[in-house]
Amino acid sequence: MESNEFENSVPPQLNQITTRLALYQHQLDAASASTSATTTSSAGANEITTTTMARDPITCHVLNTLTGTPAANLPVTLTLLTSISSSQSPVTFHATTDSDGRVKMWTPASSGSATVSALLSSLPAPDSKTSWSVRFEVGPWYEAQGVESFWPEVEVKFTVKGRGKEGEEGWRHYHVPVLLGPWNYSTYRGS
């Protein structure tokens, strides 16, 4: 490749990188602004600041690798695979990704069912393990955009250790990020 060809190809790439970095920064700013509320109270001369998170103990984030953007409006199902009561049917929650491709809160599929936090809190021990699955309805979502997808759905199964209480015996939030394309996907344990 001649140096003139290289110089001509760099500006569009730099523009693309700059645009993506701005998008990521916007996502980080929006996430930090919308997921935490800080309260401050005075106790004599000392100030105590606590931060509460507006999210369930299990969340997910989906990025569409075809466009390099968040996968907004993607239907997602979270299922508790471990039986923790006499109920034989799995406990299921539904959500749709927000404009940033995130699910922060889950809605129980059955009215009157417990929340994700309540289910985890009801476990007998801080080191209890439960198996979960998160399923992304990929086929219909891509089809609605005029894109053929190899995957009708993508399901990720994982194990959660603990009762979902921040700070309790090493509990860490469970975040399932997915990089999703019509022909591929990748996931990992997020934070």
Image (cartoon, rainbow, N blue to C red):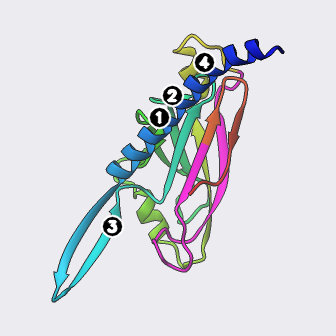
Name the residue rendered at 56%, 71% in the picture.
Answer: 162
**Amino acid marked by disc 3:** Thr
| Helix, strand or loop under label 4 | helix
How far apart, in angstroms, are the residues tagged by discs 3 and 4? 41 Å
Residue tagged 4: 12
Q: Is residue 50 above or below residue 35?
A: below
Task: Out of 63 and 33, give the one closest to the viewer.
Answer: 33
In this rendering, would 159 be left or right of 49? right
- The quarter of the picture where the C terminus appears is bottom right
The residue carrying mark 3 is 51
**Dividing the picture into quarters, in which one does residue 48 lie?**
bottom left
Tags 2 and 1 in contact by the CB under 8 Å rule?
yes
Identify the residue at horizontal 53%, vertical 42% (top origin).
61
Disc with the residue nearer the chain's start (3 vs 1)? 1
| Distance (Cα) linking label 2 and label 3 | 31 Å
Q: Mark 2 falls on what kind of element?
A: helix
Magenta part of the chain: 150-177
Could you say whether the residue bearing mark 1 is in a helix, strand or loop? helix
In the rendered structure, are the residues bearing label 3 and label 4 in contact, judged by CB atoms less than 8 Å apart? no
Mark 3 falls on what kind of element?
A: strand
Residue 160 forms part of the magenta stretch: yes
Read off the residue under disc 1. 22
Callout 4 amino acid = Pro
Q: Earlier in the sequence, mark 4 or mark 1?
A: 4
Q: Nearer the viewer, mark 3 or mark 4?
A: 4
* Residue carrying label 2: 19
Mark 2 residue type: Thr
Q: CA distance from mark 4 to mark 1?
A: 15 Å
